[in-house]
Amino acid sequence: MRRLFLILALAFPVFLTARPAGCPTGLMTDLVEHTESVWSNGFLTDLQLSDLPKSLGSFQTVEIRSLHPSFSWIVPGRYPARQTARQIVLCGIPSGEVIWDSGWVGDNRSTAVRYEGKALEPNKIYSWKVRVKTDSDGESEWSAARFFKTAGELSEYATPSYPLVKEEQGPVLQASLTDGSVLYDFGRDAFGQLRLTLTSRTGGDTVRVHLGERVKDGRVLRNPTTTVRYQLHEIALKKGTHTYKVVIPPDKRSTGPAAVKMPEYIGEVLPFRYCEVEGSQAVKSISREAVSYPFDMEAASFNCSDQTLDQIWDLCRYSVKATSFTGLFVDGDRERIPYEADALISQLCHYAADREYTLSRRTIEYLLDYPTWPTEWILQAVLMAWNDYFFTGDKRLLEQQYGILSAHCMETLIQKNGLISTTLVPQEGSFLESIRRKEKIRDIVDWPHSGSLGLAPGYGGEDDGFEYTDYNAVVNAYAFRALTLMGRIASELQKSGDAEELSGTATRMKTAFQKNFFDRKNKCYVDGIGTRHASLHTNMFALLFGLVPEKYREKVTKFIISRGMACSVYGSQFLLEALYDGDGAQVALDLMTDDSLRSWYNMIRCGSTITLEAWDDSFKPNQDWNHLWGAAPGNIIPFKLMGVEPLEPGFSKVRIRPQPGNLEHAEMSLPTIRGTIKMKIENTPQRRSVSLELPANMEAEIVLPDGFGLDS
């Protein structure tokens, strides 16, 4: 790899295009862009915030819950323009009174700039605007004003959220069946409700409606063996033409005590793609009301010379939107419960697909209050909090949750040998209370385990035969990563004493990890103290989390490659990351575009339009067909294959390190809080080049593959 700093990049075929400057755009209040929008029962209206006091009906808006919110915007122009000063003005509405004028502030901050005026008042409407100076174009015009409403109760900081929204969709295909029924295909699976306009001459007749996620022999599958959804509804018709809304009954499991409930203004939903109607002669119109968190399907794009990879990226991107239906990252429809492992992968996929951050932040905060049972997933909360800060530049979550995040490092479980054990020390009340758990935690590695959930004969679980001991190497790899990041968090919050202590603990754990888990003969890592078994998981986490000394990285990478996709769709996230970090880019690309049973193409081949919970029904007999933790390529493609990742918080500095493997062409648009990064790779014998369009107010470091730059 050849490392270039952007200021020197023009000596190589790295092309930077510039656009004329204008005014700041993309204004965000507490990380929410469309604070001025008004919805009614999920549907966007033409109303303005100022119209609400005199409007009748049920309406939903974003409510800013902070006394002193933060502001972010996109600086006009393109690289190499840098903001040198900014001015923010906040006014009360409808009076227009200026409540705060920051005056010109001479810095380059354009993300997470905190409001410094007097505390906002509840149930009020405000507007703000910003203008900037840049080193290339001088003073900009004022931005368009951004309006927002405050909540009825305010605190110094609280995460706002969008309401859930509905999108009316018609079928893309319909087919008449031999018995006179009609099958309607909406093209993709979505969580939603069904609305039909039906006609009856006499009244009293009944229309039978079958809703489902799968078809078999041209009909909606009536008896799915997994958690794939199916429902039958019977509609008794009234005389004449009327519109009927199918009422989705609550499912006992997905609406249980721990499940995230649907809000009243939305109602219960069902994931379905297909609708089969008996008595179809009565149908005048049919539509699906699909429910999701607000999502911009045009914010990101990707296409390349491999059609399979294009399909997989599209599958993963759509999965982000479709699975956001509760307003939190949940584990699909079977339980509708947030889990850390689902949320971590969902978070990264969402960052890669849309310029939206509140869904991730709210999920992190929820999981800190309601953590789940696996040891590694408790530790993942620290990783998610760090990702939130690194992608937004907003450290308020870290400030507010510092104490509970520190507890999630689980230092009280560290033994004299420097390693964590969840079995050798009683998990006492004080420990469980510190992480807000009522029941003991257990190591998981991957899921499902051998012998669980009715796995089909011959399928031994998804942890590559991992041998569990009192000292679990995967758990300790996660603990090392959590301690390392917690040390960086402490440093960012200027808690130097904590930072030094955490760094020292992490260093001791790294030494203990190498001493106790490294197999010097085979140059790989074993699963625990007392076993010689070496799994894919132990080695991929060791490599990914920086536990492998440089002199052994090549050997460990070769071991990882030798195991193939010996993990679940969850584990694939970390396998692919480790391969790209370990210079195994071509192997990672081959795994992503594979068409075997353990592949994303198999999900498409099965007929799913949202990523599955497992590679196939045979790997998890109770799996559902709407699980975002299976969408790893959605973030791996932009962040690893295209190689665009933040180097500093809030994308103030970005690294461009493409690893295209044998792809001849790849092109993408990646939304960031500072604006969209556009990138194009040409990788043929005739031309090897990278073209970039970077937002203003961003620095970059470029690392090109060997051979790039030879042909201009």
Image (tube, rainbow, N blue to C red):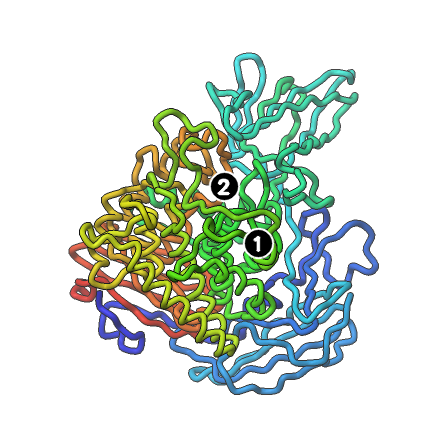
Q: Is residue 487 left or right of residue 167?
A: left
Instruction: Note whether 484 is above or below 197 in the view shown.
Output: below
> What is the number of the mark on residue 428?
1
| Residue 292 visible in the current orientation | yes
Q: Residue furthest top?
A: 179
Point out the image quarter for the N terminus.
bottom left
Q: Residues within 10 Å of mark 2 (few under 14, many from 20)?
A: many
> What is the number of the mark on residue 650?
none
The amino acid type found where label 2 is placed reads His
Residue 38 on image: x %, y %: 70, 56
Q: Nearer the viewer, mark 1 or mark 2?
A: 1
Residue 144 on image: x %, y %: 61, 71
SS of the residue under disc 2: loop
Instruction: Name the one closer to the observer, 367 or 171.
Output: 367
Residue 317 on image: x %, y %: 46, 48
Instruction: Note whether 621 is above or below 10 in the view shown.
Output: above
Q: Which residue is mark 2?
A: 627
Q: Is residue 276 left or right of residue 387?
A: right
Instruction: Name the one closer to the observer, 496 or 584.
Output: 496
For the residues marked 1 and 2, what is the alpha-carbon distance in whole angstroms? Answer: 34 Å
